[in-house]
Amino acid sequence: MTTKTHNGQRDPFDLIGLAALNLVWFTMLAVGVTVWWALLFPMFSIPVVLAGVAGLFWGPVAALVVVGVSIAGIMLWRLRRPEMFERWVTRRARTRFLIWFRYRRRWAKLMSACHLSIDRGDRTFIPRLLSADIGPVTDRVRVRMLDGHCPADFENRVSHLAHAFGALDCRATITGPGTVELAFRRSDSLAETVILPRVDHWTKGRGQAA
């Protein structure tokens, strides 16, 4: 009787193939993210494209001129129309970043930690994040429930969800067939300091009138 032993080492060609597939996947992901952000912020992506075209046809000096003019235009826009710049650039960038940082970044992991995933055989299904709205006090996240979920599954896990996503509290509301809205309260609006106007001139006016 002979005994076969396996050292557990993998074929180097398998490792190389796996590394190549991972490289292709991350490259495609990076390209997709870049294109998505370019479409969201054409005021930045268009000058970059124009600078590339200028550098290709007329040299690096032309590219630097295009970059300088674009930066000057953006800075002038920021100084002359701060409200418009805030609405079209700063707020949109902040919202996109917070949606990713607060929710999409760890969505699958936290759904499993809150016992809202469903295992079927060797596959794990995660509720789909449909959309997220970032508010000054409350974030509203719309979620597609899985087959087999019921409203009580989310309503009974609101404390776990609030703790997992770093919110003060969470409310679950059914907004449609198979759709639940999670309202994460992240700050207390009543705790903010309200500055009242001075009333010196009112009292002085009354004293003088008397």
Image (cartoon, helix red, strand yellow):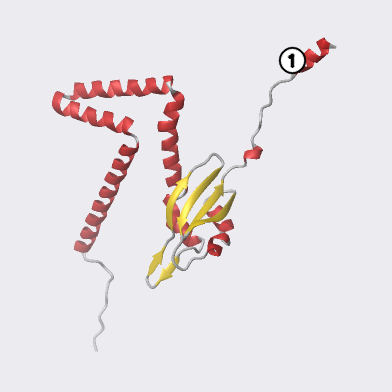
Residue receiving disc 1: 201
Residue 39, can we see it? yes
Q: Is residue 138 above or below residue 83?
A: below
Answer with the quarter of the image where residue 209 lies.
Answer: top right
In-image side of 76 versus 32 (left or right): right
Q: How many marks overall?
A: 1
Quadrant where the C terminus sits is: top right
Q: Position of residue 180 (x, y in %)?
A: 50, 56
Residue 43 location (% of width, % of height):
33, 30
Left or right: residue 3 versus residue 76 is: left
Q: Residues within 10 Å of mark 1 (few under 14, many from 20)?
A: few
Q: At 41% across and 23% down in the image, what residue appears? A: 78
In the rendered image, the residue lying farthest to the top is: 208
The quarter holding residue 49 reads: top left
Q: Amino acid at mark 1?
A: His
Q: What is the quadrant of the N terminus in the image?
A: bottom left
Residue for point 56% across, 45% down: 186
Secondary structure beneath disc 1?
helix
Residue 7 occupies quadrant:
bottom left
